[in-house]
Image (spheres, rainbow, N blue to C red):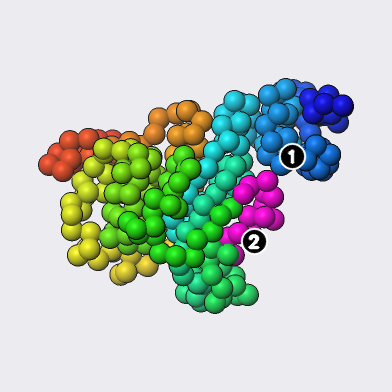
Amino acid sequence: MNLEKALIDVAEEYEAPNGKVFRGISLDSVRKIARDFNLSCREVEIVALKQSIIPLRYQRNIGTLGTDGQIKLLESCVAVIGCGGLGGLLIELLARAGISELKVVDSKSFKEENLNRQILSSEISIGRMKAEVARERIKTVNSATEIETYTVEFDSRNGKKILSGVDVVVDALDSVKARLVLQDVARRLKLPLVSAAIAGFCGYVTVILPGDSGWRALYGGQGSDVNGVERELGNLGATAAVAASLETQEVIKLISGRGEILRNRFLFFDTERNFFTYIDVSESPKGLKRTRTLSREK
């Protein structure tokens, strides 16, 4: 029996929330076929999708992304630099979306002060390396996602090796200096970078393609001398969740080819005053301007 025939045999009919019937395959069936054919679960899921057989775990993605979009996620590799407030949630959301391979980088271990916002932290993980906790967590969320961990500080020397084979890089760092280093490495490797920064109730999210000014439109070359406002305001868990969710959507759009990415724009949000606005950096560094307010300022 070939793989396609095996998938057809185990596929069952299910009713979607909109009442339409679709052919689907359960996680248990995916795992069994993977064992029988000596394949990875991801390989089985891709072949199933090409036959319009929907892995149940991705059924709620299909209405938005389609089978082609889901396959693109299942064939992609994303690097997340930082496993803290932004990175922890990013890693989980990307794995749940179906990203095939994750490279996660963080040299730090969890501390008590991380418990307010870092989704991977818990009372029993205090003192453990963040990247290793991320690996364990993702294996319980999506066992088909391969996760490669680096318990080092990302820099210009190790960046090329870490980002080898990556499709999209995601910034979940906590300093301007580190963020500028990551932007420069991604530019040299011609990789798209999804980036964010948060403090208090507020945050920025942007997409930086090779050749874009990105964060240098705001900071120039002075990143090493800039103290982040988060050192004064701290970071709320909900603020991190908003920024990480927006970053995840940008990654999904970049990979799937859907929607409009935040290139040459910083999406600024202030959840205390309930507004979102764009800051246009297409004419940076001299021409910074606010271009659109998405909800009323108070």
Q: Characterize the magenta stretch by its predominant secondary structure.
A: helix
- Residue at x 56% of width, y 67% of height: 121
- For the question of whether residue 84 can be seen, the reply is no
Question: Mark 1 or 2, which is nearer the eye?
Answer: 1
Tell me the number on the disc at residue 285. Answer: none
Q: Is residue 110 above or below residue 200?
A: below
Quadrant of residue 279 in the image?
top left
Label 2 Cα neighbours within 10 Å, binned few <14 / some 14-19 / many ≥20: few
Q: Can you identify the residue that label 1 sits on? A: 39
Looking at this view, name the residue that lies furthest to the left: 286
- Residue at x 18% of width, y 54% of height: 221
Marks 1/2: CA–CA distance:
22 Å
Label 1 Cα neighbours within 10 Å, binned few <14 / some 14-19 / many ≥20: some
Secondary structure under the numbered disc 2 in the rendered image: helix
Residue 94 at x, y percent in the picture: 56, 46
Q: Can you identify the residue that label 2 sits on? A: 136
- Which amino acid, by three-letter code, is at mark 2? Glu
- For the question of whether residue 195 can be seen, the reply is yes
Q: Earlier in the sequence, mark 1 or mark 2?
A: 1
Magenta stretch encompasses residue 266: no
- Which amino acid, by three-letter code, is at mark 1? Leu
Say which quadrant the N terminus sits in: top right
- Residue at x 68% of width, y 46% of height: 144
- Range shown magenta: 133-146
Residue 87 at x, y percent in the picture: 48, 56
Residue 15 at x, y percent in the picture: 78, 28
Secondary structure under the numbered disc 1 in the rendered image: loop
